[in-house]
């Protein structure tokens, strides 16, 4: 295969990484470019080019992907992990209309609607609670701060 084909394939694979993220295709692109460069320097038979491509891609993938999480990792606060919709009701008050216990959902009344709710505390009917966040159609609630 002509060396230019390997180099073009390598750039196509690297560009594809931006479209299909996962940080895997990138290493096959590097392997293809390296195979193209080696093919320019040394006249290699096609079967050997494929072997070199496979070996280089695998070595790059195994060697560098292991270090990438360490390089790109950061400290993320728990609140930032939540989607914005999860926090849209945070801090607002609701009224318990069905008792809530740890591990057992109950119900609260919020904005004239009944919502399923859960909490790490035991909450009795009639208590006013504070919404911590929303998990799909379930509100996570707690006793108001300062009580």
Image (tube, rainbow, N blue to C red):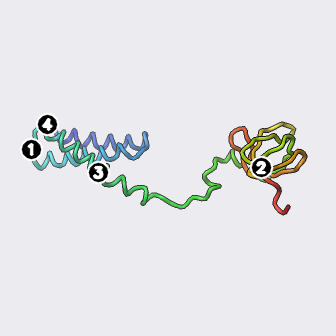
| Separation of residues labelled 2 and 3 (CA atoms) | 48 Å
> Dot 3 corresponds to which residue?
60
Residue at 22% across / 49% down in the picture? 34
Residue at 19% across / 39% down in the picture? 50
| Separation of residues labelled 4 and 2 (CA atoms) | 64 Å
The answer to whether mark 4 and mark 3 are in CB contact below 8 A is: no
Residue at 18% across / 44% down in the picture? 52
Badge 4 marks a residue whose secondary structure is helix
> Dot 2 corresponds to which residue?
141
> Dot 1 corresponds to which residue?
43
| Separation of residues labelled 4 and 1 (CA atoms) | 12 Å
| Separation of residues labelled 4 and 3 (CA atoms) | 20 Å
Q: Nearer the viewer, residue 117 or 64?
A: 117
Q: Nearer the viewer, residue 10 or 95?
A: 95
| Separation of residues labelled 1 and 2 (CA atoms) | 69 Å
Q: Name which of mark 2 and mark 3 comes first in the sequence.
A: 3
User: How dense is the environment of label 3, judged by Cα within 10 Å: few (below 14), some, or many (20 and up)?
Assistant: some
Q: Position of residue 2 (x, y in %)?
A: 16, 38
Residue at 10% across / 42% down in the picture? 44
Give the quarter of the image for residue 64: bottom left
> Dot 4 corresponds to which residue?
47
């Amino acid at each position: 295969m002509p060396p230019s084909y390997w180099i073009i394939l390598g750039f196509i694979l690297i560009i594809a990484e931006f479209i299909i993220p996962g940080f895997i295709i990138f290493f096959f692109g590097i392997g293809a470019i390296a195979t193209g460069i080696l093919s320019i320097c040394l006249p290699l038979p096609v079967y050997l080019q494929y072997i070199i491509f496979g070996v280089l891609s695998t070595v790059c993938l195994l060697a560098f992907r292991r270090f990438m999480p360490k390089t790109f990792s950061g400290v993320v606060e728990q609140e930032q992990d939540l989607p914005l919709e999860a926090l849209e009701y945070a801090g607002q008050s609701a009224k318990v209309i069905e008792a809530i216990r740890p591990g057992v959902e109950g119900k609260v009344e919020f904005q004239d609607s009944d919502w399923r709710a859960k909490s790490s505390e035991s909450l009795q009917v009639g208590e006013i609670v504070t919404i911590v966040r929303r998990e799909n159609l379930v509100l996570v609630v707690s006793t108001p701060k300062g009580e």
